[in-house]
Image (cartoon, rainbow, N blue to C red):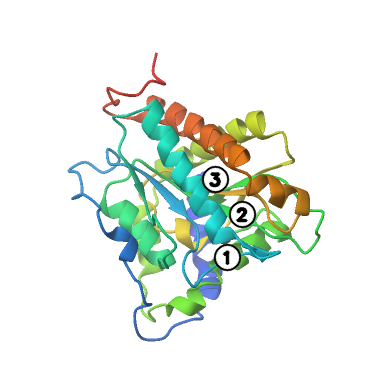
Amino acid sequence: MTAAKRNVLMLLIPLVGAFGLSACAGQAPGADRGAKGISPAPAVPGEGPVVIDPGHGGEDTGAVAAGSSESHLVLAVALKLRKALAAQAPGLPVVLTRESDVFVPLKGRMEMANRVGARLFISIHANSGQRLAARGFETYLLSAEATDSEAHRVALAENSVLEREGMAAQDPLFETLLSLASAEQLRQSEELAGAVHLSLAQSLGTENRGVKQAPFYVLARAQMPSVLVEIGFITNKAERDLLFADAYQEKLAQALATSILEFNSRHAAHPQAGDKSRP
Ligand SMILES: [Zn+2]
């Protein structure tokens, strides 16, 4: 059995425990709000937009430290990333799962990306640590089995909003995971994670915590290469000051844009005419 197939199978059991607990009726307020303005799905999956997913939003602030919230930080970085992509590859379609401080359910984010036939999906988050000295960035792939206890803790923190969202009791998560996650999609996600992580490592000059795997709900059911980036720790005073500085956010956005365009130039079926990153 290939590692990729094993990953898909391993998704099943822990996801039941991680995601099956919060069943109750009703749709969360603001559901699908982030889908406004999305153009109709293209005919061919994978030729649609780059989908950038700023984590959290609205009542879900994500991690908070010294009055600063993750949701505001990652939205600022996502907007700068969109701008950087537009400057370097004007013909490349880009969509954000949210463009303002609104709540978007986790499930709706990947549904949106699948609906528009996204060519890749990148979810942007910031970390918080029990150890205030913890710092650095890390890039994640979806897997049922976390790389280590720290990766498991990060996934639990990022998934915790599910309880607020009221997951449907009969969520077809497990069937769709089996039917949709192909070995090729997982392989390309690994490649995208490698590209993103290398670019951040070359640009940021902070601690490199590595490429890891963990059961992030937002990445489940992806039909395209998809990764989640933790750009730094807002619980670390020095790193928090950096993360909320305009220049550092710009650096982050440029590094992410470089890796996205590099990956896209290798995989796009129809390269964009305006992609200045292409030779
Ligand atoms: Zn987060």
> Would you call the spot at circle 3 few (<14 residues within 10 Å), some (14-19), or many (20 or more)?
few
Please state which amino acid type lies under the numbered disc 3: Ala
Relative image position of residue 242 (x, y in whole percent) = 69, 45
Q: Which residue is mark 2?
A: 126
Residue occupying image coordinates x 46% and y 56%:
219
Q: Cβ–Cβ below 8 Å for labels 1 and 2?
A: yes
Element on which disc 2 rests: strand
Displayed quadrant of residue 247: top right
Q: Is residue 226 something that shows in the picture?
A: no
Q: Cβ–Cβ below 8 Å for labels 3 and 2?
A: no
99 horizontally vs 7: left or right: left
Q: Which residue is mark 3?
A: 3
Relative image position of residue 206 (x, y in whole percent) = 73, 38
Q: Which mark is residue 215?
A: none
> Between tags 1 and 3, which lies in front?
1
> Ligand 1: which quarter?
bottom right
Element on which disc 1 rests: loop
Q: Is residue 91 above or below residue 213?
A: above
Element on which disc 3 rests: helix
